[in-house]
Image (cartoon, rainbow, N blue to C red):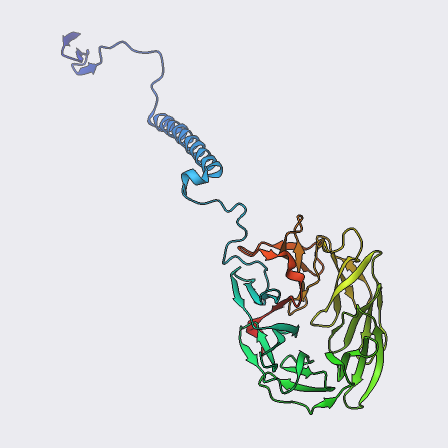
Amino acid sequence: MDIQHGDRYTSIMNNRGSTVLTDPRPMSDSPVPDAQAIIDEARRHQRRRQRRVAVLITILIVVLGAVALFKPSVVFNPGAPSRTGQGTPTNTPLVNSPTPLTLDLFRSAPTPTDVSVDLATGAVRTSTHLGLYAAMPRQGYVLGYNVSPNGTYGAFSYDLRHTLSTWTGRYGTNPVPANDPRFVWVSSWSGTATEVNQNEQPVAPTVAIPALTLVVGQAGPNLVLTGSPPLHLLELWSPTQQRILATLGSGESLLPDVSAGTIVWSERNVVNIDRADGSPGPVLLVPSGDVARFLAISPDGSKVAIVFQPAPGTPRAGKGGHVVIEDIASGVSTSVTGSTGALDLFAWSPDSSRVFFPQLNRADTLVSVATYRIGSRQAIPLPIPGLHLPRNLHGAWASILVGSPATEG
């Protein structure tokens, strides 16, 4: 055998005369891996690297999320002011309702003032109004009258679109709601009453009513009168028959409210819910030590909202009361939780689903506005920004009215 050495390989001449090239490095006992084993090992290494990257990304996301949760003012908006104690910002709905609602608060003492709140946006508008408020139709406008320096009476209506209509006063004073909100009754101490529309056009002939009485509302086709001497009587008067159909009550605390089918009035310690023809209906006893200070029939005529307050001379007199909702058909009463401190003004939403009322704060110095949705657990305050109502909102001729400007005719 002829052996020749080169740089890397050794040439070996075998016995048959052919040359074979061999590697001079020592042989290993381990088996030589094939190509597929090498590929599998590379894939396992790649998967381990991908898992490590995924873990690192997850940790980074958690850290950034924690920073965003606990330090938003630093990371995202370092100059953002805090709204703590600022109330609800403008353009935030105060009441979620399919019907656009406007809350108007009227106050005539000592300065005639109108505060209008858009419950869809929270916007507040304040303006000075004209005179004394005599009555409030439920469908979105208030009625009133004033006296000129020469003694002439002028009646006006003011709707939630903030459109003012005035009358000359030739129909007398004391405008009150009729069944149709487009019409009003205007009566005077001269013993007459006339139904007119908002354009000062009579829609019915002037009718005679008992002397020294005033119309306080229309129940069906009949008029509800108050003031008959020598007693302060509440009476149901038929304009067509020219006679008194029923005497409902007497006393200083009549506080009537009238709808098309119902007359609600209070006398001493009871609230009477009578029908439009004068026949008696449910009777609600006032809680012990309280008096009914305000009555309001819902627009659909199904319920009566009552503000009960401590009777004069009791320790809590003048400190506000609480609200009770009475179902006219069933006679079931619901005492509204969260209504403590309620004052003697009230308003229903046009769909009869909510009531609104002023409420004293705990210090009895300011008044806020609260709302109660029928069937809910409790009343809630409306955090209207910038609206601080005076303690004497419930003073002479103050009123609260809710309506929908978009649906008024």
* Front position in the image: 85 or 255: 255
Please report the residue visible at 40 percent of the width from the left and 43 percent of the height from the top.
Answer: 79
Query: Can you tell which quarter of the image residue 383 is in?
Result: bottom right
Pick the quarter of the image with the C terminus. Answer: bottom right
Residue 228 pos. (x, y %): 80, 80
Looking at the image, residue 282 sits to the left or right of residue 319; the answer is right
In the rendered image, the vertical position of residue 119 relative to residue 232, given as above or below: above
Q: Is residue 272 above or below residue 225?
A: above
| Residue located at (74% from left, 80% from top) | 214
Camera-side residue of 339 and 157: 157
- Could you say which is closer to the camera, residue 326 or residue 255? 255
Residue 105 position, x and y percent, is: 60, 65
Q: Quadrant of residue 135?
A: bottom right
Q: Which of the image's four quarters has the N terminus? A: top left
Quick check: 223 above or below 29? below
Coordinates of residue 10 in the picture (x, y in percent): 17, 11
Compared across the picture, whether 254 is left or right of 51 comes to right
> Is any atom of residue 218 visible in this view?
no
Specify the quadrant of the image occupied by residue 141.
bottom right
Q: Is residue 57 above or below residue 380?
A: above
